[in-house]
Image (tube, coloured by chain):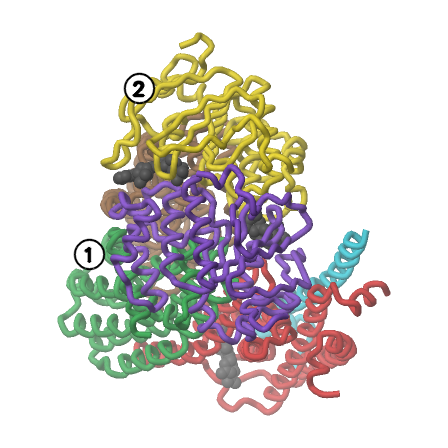
Chain colours: A cyan, B yellow, C purple, D brown, E green, F red
Amino acid sequence: MEWASWSDFWDMGGYGLYVWGSYAVTAACILMEVILLKRGAGQTRRRLKRMRQWEES
Amino acid sequence: MPDNVLLSAHDLACTRGDRLLFKAMNFGLVAGELLLVQGGNGQGKTSLLRLLTGLSRPEAGEVRWRGQPIARCGETYHREMAYLGHANGIKDELNPLENLRFADGLQGRAFDAARAERTLGDLGLARCLDLPCRVLSFGQRRRVALAALLLAGATLWILDEPLTGLDVHAVAQMEGLLRDHLAAGGMVVATTHQALNLAGVRVQRLLVGNVAIPDIAASPDPVAEGAA
Amino acid sequence: MPDNVLLSAHDLACTRGDRLLFKAMNFGLVAGELLLVQGGNGQGKTSLLRLLTGLSRPEAGEVRWRGQPIARCGETYHREMAYLGHANGIKDELNPLENLRFADGLQGRAFDAARAERTLGDLGLARCLDLPCRVLSFGQRRRVALAALLLAGATLWILDEPLTGLDVHAVAQMEGLLRDHLAAGGMVVATTHQALNLAGVRVQRLLVGNVAIPDIAASPDPVAEGAA
Amino acid sequence: MTRFLLAVLRRDLTLAARRRGDWLIALFFFVMVASLFPLGIGPDPKLLARIGPGVLWVAATLASLLSLSRLFADDHRDGSLEHMVLSPEPTVLLVLGKSLAHWLIYGIPLLLIAPVLGVQFHLPADAIGVLLLSLLIGTPILSLLGGVGAALTLGLRGGGVLLTLLILPLYVPALIFGAGAVDGVLAGTGAEAHLSLLGAFLILTLLVAPWIAAAALKVSLE
Amino acid sequence: MTRFLLAVLRRDLTLAARRRGDWLIALFFFVMVASLFPLGIGPDPKLLARIGPGVLWVAATLASLLSLSRLFADDHRDGSLEHMVLSPEPTVLLVLGKSLAHWLIYGIPLLLIAPVLGVQFHLPADAIGVLLLSLLIGTPILSLLGGVGAALTLGLRGGGVLLTLLILPLYVPALIFGAGAVDGVLAGTGAEAHLSLLGAFLILTLLVAPWIAAAALKVSLE
Amino acid sequence: MNLYTYASPATFYHLAGRLIPWFAWSAGILTLVGLYIGFFVAPTDFQQSEAYRVIFIHVPAAWMGMFIYLVMAFWGAIGLAFNTRLSFMMVRALAPTGAIFTFIALWTGALWGKPMWGAWWVWDARLTSTLILLFLYIGIMALWAAIDDVKRGDRAGALLALIGAINVPIIYFSVKWWNTLHQGASVSLTKAPTMATIMLTGMLIMAFAAWFYSIAVALARVRAIILERERHTEWVKDILER
Ligand code: HEM
Ligand SMILES: Nc1ncnc2c1ncn2[C@@H]1O[C@H](COP(=O)(O)OP(=O)(O)OP(=O)(O)O)[C@@H](O)[C@H]1O
Ligand SMILES: Nc1ncnc2c1ncn2[C@@H]1O[C@H](COP(=O)(O)OP(=O)(O)OP(=O)(O)O)[C@@H](O)[C@H]1O
Ligand SMILES: [Mg+2]
Ligand SMILES: [Mg+2]
């Protein structure tokens, strides 16, 4: 095990800001993409359904 | 000249480049009257109409509105006048409704969305309300410009070939609109190369240039085109 | 379909945006025949004509020239076809003669100045040869475009509202030109909202869209408009 | 009157929003020009900091210039300019509204992105502050003066160059005062003098330019 | 085939001559960008010589970009582009002709004025020579690549921005090799390497760009 | 059953639906393993201390950013050559993911550069060409946004991707030569001299995770695009019914 304690872990030898900044933004980007995709898929389905009903009537 | 003449031209002359298009032109227009400007291509109809709007200045003579030279009553005149030229004056990026909204705003009028929508619907554009005008067909864009004209609520309409690109139904409709406008005491100055059925309308003809025009336009008896 | 069909459409379909304009359209055109495309504003006439020129691709089906899909015989087809759209395709900065010169050059033809000048003169533009097209009137600019069409010497003319902005004399002249072209074995696909007198011409009508068009255009008996 | 001004503003802003890209023009032009210079000149941070204010101000001038030629041209082409001039409201207001819209569309995004570019050019924080201030005062001048140029050159052929030639030198004072203010901070001589000159120039322009532009517009439409 | 190419060339050159201002504006733009720098940065000759090649090359890039958005747009608007595409000759030739005309109209004047600007930036004579050579090889690249961008953005809202956004990244190699060649002379490392790379890039562009532009043009007209 | 069967949107839609969970779960598990190795197994670096741990996302992201662009160009070329609808849809599905990875590479690189080089940004070959790659991605997406017509957008975007793909290597080398000729080697990527095997393992595992993630996301996006484009067909109607 590399880390003596959790605070050591978060500190990253003084580079915590840079390392965690990188990982946080990466996580945020990926999370955003996944969420947008999930939401978008649902929305597309619903919109297509609505359009279909509208076109048929 | 009678007293109730609203729009009048006095000894108008117009040159473009080194060409004299016309000179010593006089007329007076009373409420409820249509001035049909006729002439062949390039005889100076558009040039005359632009003089009447005040966009360009005559070489000689003057145009008067309610007895005053229009150069001096600029803004009151512009409030009562609406112009439709060869160009439609609508923005390609906006949809028809937005175009009308801004046309109203620029005239300093409040915008009545319901009325605008109704007008567009009457002109057969109900299905195009959400489309940018860029994708509309030639005739549909002309119709949007006509809708803007109708909403302007002006007394005097100056129309340069309003029928270009309109299909037969729209032409018939336009004839009805002109008739209504004149009946309500409005005035129209128009040019057109197409036949117009304007039975029962008080028409004054003005020939610009020296190309004879057979008497087809504004013939009092309905010809085939009107019967849509 | 007879053997001598030169231009034919097979199960054409066209969509613009999310709108289906038409589908399953079929026709065949033989030499000396005029195809009059009719329909109200925004029904898809222009869209059809652009399909026929090859400028846009059909959603389904294909257009054939001498039995070959036009997508595959591109350049030989373009040599025999001339298109006139809503836009004139002339440059405002050039004078009519220069416009024709470049139109010829772009078709890879040698330029015959005398012939071009004669054509322009026939179309009533003799006085405008030195003016940049920018200052020409609406109808005069259309005439320049028509002159370019005539000089192209194509077999097939595809004309989108060729009469817009033309005065009655020019319309009559145009009718004569169409008749001559057809009589010489040419073919025409045209749209127009105006009445056309085409007595003695073999006409095929095609209604695009669902707006009924009263039977005025190309009526065999001369109506008032034609009698200039 | 106010309604008219607002209508002009709203219209131009809507059009810009509709053309989407359009208001991004300043941003991207700015960013790209700023990225091009290091590529052309070399990556030396000291050198970049030295030329930073000049580069950014030149880029701002160019970005506004690039968009100005279309200030009236599009409306002229489709005929809506005639309708606007024929409106009952005075043409000066129209010009003012369009210049203002131009500034909002092209000037503001410039202001927003300028700090990022300042960092890329290794400018210190106080210099970036003054850069922002100078752009805030200076870019409206560009829009107003540009309006005159656009009106004069509308639809003109050969004359266009000549008039552009006349208008562009008018930009020079704005550029010198603006870049000078930032340079002053870098050199430690302070920015006040330059900034107040810039402010005076703005007021002068505001008082004069719209009238000239309105007159020019009417002449151009004849 | 040659006749067609010549016709396209002659036509565009005539139009440019007729519009007069047009080519002067790009030229003026070039001169202005180059002369604004001394104004924005200060008159230090050493500094100016150091940044000179980069600034001149960036200015050339921007000047070509400025005029590119109109490469096809005017012809598209008045319908003559359709006629040209419908001509029996292949569209690649059309694109090539128009790019060539663009280069003649905008590139050549730049070449003619560049020595003057080089002197303004205190560049030595041999560096000016290489600058000219690099511009001679490099500006056709700008016109050719620009043709692709102009064809892709034809008739789009905000075409101007998009064009900048699409094309400037592709210009980077030309800019770097071009400015690098002059810098090489200044630094005494020689210019041959950069110039030959620039030449190779030109040949590659000449082989690829017209085809892509022709395809893009057809797509845009649909 | 041949290749063309899969090229039909209907078949591909269902196939993609079945594949997505596999890729997604693989990506998740690999990420966990990779992060565990990266943070708890890999030792502290001699020169960079702990800052180097950015490498486990920086390098995979940079690779993906470049790789996805190539794949896009490939599909674009296929689409232009054979006019296959599915290829164009793939291009559209890939672009956002590529742009995001490129952005991540830039961001993590900048955060890494501050402690290592003392500056957020230097005009180095890799950095500059990555920035330009991001501009290319944005350019393509902006082009799509500006074109309403789907088919026109497809083709225009494919053409742009193609010419970009030809240019990206040229840009990279041009910037590299530019920099070295000018500056000497005052800034260059300080490659960890002997990258420990365990570090490399962690990085490779993260790279595979990024791969699987990209595939899963692109497939999901392409499914939505297929539905939209094929909405007039019977099979889509059936799906919507359900
Ligand atoms: C904004 C800043 C940065 C960007 C855009 C960037 C971009 C890239 C790219 C595109 C790659 C893949 C290239 C290849 O594999 O050939 C890469 C790899 C790499 N980068 Fe960065 N980088 C940045 C900053 C940094 C910094 C500050 C460091 C370390 C001090 C660094 C270390 C590395 C390492 C070690 C690799 C792997 C090289 C290899 O295995 O080939 N990067 N970077
Ligand atoms: N600078 C100029 N030099 C010479 N003649 C000019 C100049 N500018 C315009 N003209 C001529 O003036 C006339 C302008 O006509 P105008 O546009 O008013 O015609 P019009 O009657 O509206 O024609 P149309 O029916 O075709 O619309 C044209 O014949 C044109 O050739
Ligand atoms: N993106 C789009 N979305 C929806 N509808 C569209 C779109 N683009 C075009 N259209 C519609 O397609 C039709 C195109 O018609 P086209 O220009 O072919 O008509 P036309 O028959 O030539 O009419 P006109 O007589 O007015 O010239 C129009 O009704 C237009 O509204
Ligand atoms: Mg007229
Ligand atoms: Mg039409």
Taking the spot 46% from the left edge, 54% from the top edge, the residue there is: C178
Res B170 → quadrant: top right
Which percent across, then down, holds residue D116? 45, 57
Q: In this view of the protein, can residue D30 be seen by the observer?
A: no
Mark 1, secondary structure of its residue: loop
- The residue where tag 2 is placed is B11
* Above/below status of E90 relative to F149: below
Which percent across, then down, holds residue D143? 37, 42
Q: Which mark is residue C210?
A: none
Taking the spot 53% from the left edge, 71% from the top edge, the residue there is: C65
Res E176 → quadrant: bottom left
Left or right: where E131 falls relative to D62: left
Mark 2, secondary structure of its residue: strand
Q: In this view of the protein, can residue B39 be seen by the observer?
A: yes
Which percent across, then down, holds residue D50? 30, 60
Residues packed near mark 1 inside 10 Å, few (<14), some (14 to 19) or many (20 plus) = few
Which percent across, then down, holds residue F61? 58, 76
Dot 1 amino acid type: Pro
Residue sitting farthest toward the right = F242
- The residue where tag 1 is placed is E43
Task: Choose between F13 and C32: the one closer to the eye.
Answer: C32
Task: Choose between E85 and C155: the one closer to the eye.
Answer: C155
